[in-house]
Amino acid sequence: MAKLLGVSAHDYSCDNFFRKGSKMSNYVTREGLGKLKEQFEEIKLKLKEVSIKIKEARELGDLSENAEYHEAKNEQSFLMGKEAELDQKIKNAQIIEKNDKSDVIVVGSTVKIDDDGDVMDYTIVGSDEADPLVGMISVDSPIGASLIGHKKGDKIEVRTPAGTSTCKIISIS
């Protein structure tokens, strides 16, 4: 994988690798949407806990020198941002419907490619579910975007930070 991508596994797994200057997709599997909803509910519970911490810290008196209060307010701010982000992702989610009969690569396809003798399997998913280390790549990544719309037997060029690589599509499922 690192050969095609031209980066180390650590670099490839970083959130910012694919986010530089591009709008991320809203694709998600039903399972992934369920996980987003679970995270959203967890954040809501944490926000309730933090509001109790803030109330208790206020009761201690002088807020200007109250470290517990400031820490709780910072945590509340972070959690509110995360809550808003998850809410938007859930509202805008586009569910990936697997179509096993498609001979063209789409989001949800599993693809086997040959990159100069290195055979790799990838499943094309949305950015929230991407985990390149287990073969789940984002449709927004350089290789994911390059694969979309191609067929078995096609040779494609993939532009990465390390340069351009050519690979052949062996199979689509």
Image: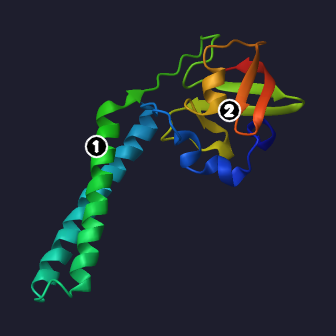
**Callout 2 secondary element:** strand
* Total tally of numbered discs in the picture: 2
> Which image quadrant is residue 72 in?
bottom left
Horizontal arrangement in the rendering, residue 42 relative to residue 61 (left or right): right
Q: Residue at x 60, y 34 (%)?
A: 141
Residue identifier under label 1: 87
Q: Are marks 2 and 1 in contact (CB under 8 Å)?
A: no
Q: Which residue is found at the position 75% from the left and 19% from the top?
A: 156
In-front residue for pair 26/104: 26
Instruction: State the CA–CA distance, disc 2 to disc 1.
Output: 28 Å
Report x, y in % for residue 55: 12, 77
**Residue 141 vs residue 123, the one in the foreground:** 141
Percent x, y of residue 106? 57, 19
Residue 130 position (above or below residue 144): below
Q: Tell me the kind of residue under disc 1.
A: Asp
**Residue 142 point in image, percent of width and height:** 64, 31
The 10 Å Cα crowd at callout 2, few under 14, some 14 to 19, many 20 or more, is many
Among numbered discs 2 and 1, the one appearing first in the sequence: 1
Identify the residue at image location x=70%, y=39%: 161
Quadrant, the C terminus: top right
Type of the residue with mark 2: Tyr
Q: Quadrant of residue 26?
A: top left
Instruction: Kindly state the secondary structure of the residue where label 1 is placed.
Output: helix
Q: Is residue 148 above or below residue 11?
A: above
On the picture, is 127 further left or further right than 152?
A: left
Q: Nearer the viewer, residue 29 or 105?
A: 105
Horizontal and vertical percent for residue 136?
Answer: 62, 38
Circle nearer the viewer, 2 or 1:
1
Residue 119, above or below 63: above
Mark seen at residue 132: none
Q: Residue at x 54, y 47 (%)?
A: 16
Q: What residue would you read off at disc 2?
A: 122
